[in-house]
Image (spheres, helix red, strand yellow):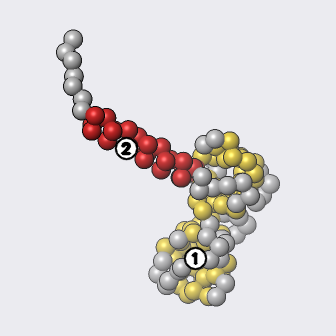
Amino acid sequence: MKKIKVSLAAVSAIMFLVSAMAAHNCEAASKFAKGMTVAAKWTDDNYYLAKIKAVNGDKYDVDYADGTKGTVTADQIKEIPAKSKLAKGDKVLAVWARAKFYSGTVVEVKPNGAIVKWDDGSSPSFAPFGKIIK
């Protein structure tokens, strides 16, 4: 078996990278907290309004707006900004009916939300801030 020489600098660099990656993962995981209203993915691969009820490591227990409960991971959650910097022509996901997010394009920005032209061909309608994701 051959001996491999590794410099102290190389070991330090590797430890630094591992530490930085772990810190990044902790920051990403802590982005969502109990009580936040978010867009959470459901089993049909669509996003719905939900509230985070508990954080269990890398899993989030959520209550969907229709009363359904579920557990999701961070990659299945989208943060909903209270007020988004939107401009005409921006592609968005927004709540159109009930609590489901649909894709569309901003046609007009209002003080409290935006008029969205829906990708499915439905008539443009208003979506309030807190229910729009850029």
Pick the front one: 23 or 116: 23
Q: What element carries label 2?
A: helix
Would you say the residues marked 2 and 1 are in contact, meaning their CB atoms lie under 8 Å apart?
no
As drawn, 91 above or below 12: below
Pick the front one: 102 or 9: 9
Q: Where, quadrant-wise, is the N terminus in this rendering?
A: top left
Residue 79, image x, y percentages = 60, 62
Label 2: which residue? 17
Pick the front one: 93 or 75: 75
Tell which tag, 2 or 1, sits nearer the viewer: 2
3D distance between C-alphas at marks 2 and 1: 34 Å
Q: What element carries label 1?
A: loop
Q: How crowded is mark 2: few (under 14 residues within 10 Å), some or many (20 or more)?
A: few
* Residue appearing at x 62%, y 66% in the figure: 80
Label 1: which residue? 84
Amino acid type, mark 2: Leu
State left or right for residue 63 relative to residue 8. right
* Residue appearing at x 70%, y 60% in the figure: 36
Q: Residues within 10 Å of mark 1 (few under 14, many from 20)?
A: some
Residue 66, image x, y percentages = 78, 58
* Residue appearing at x 38%, y 43% in the figure: 16
Residue 41, image x, y percentages = 61, 53
Which of the 4 image quarters holds residue 85? bottom right
For this orientation, the residue located farthest to the right is: 67
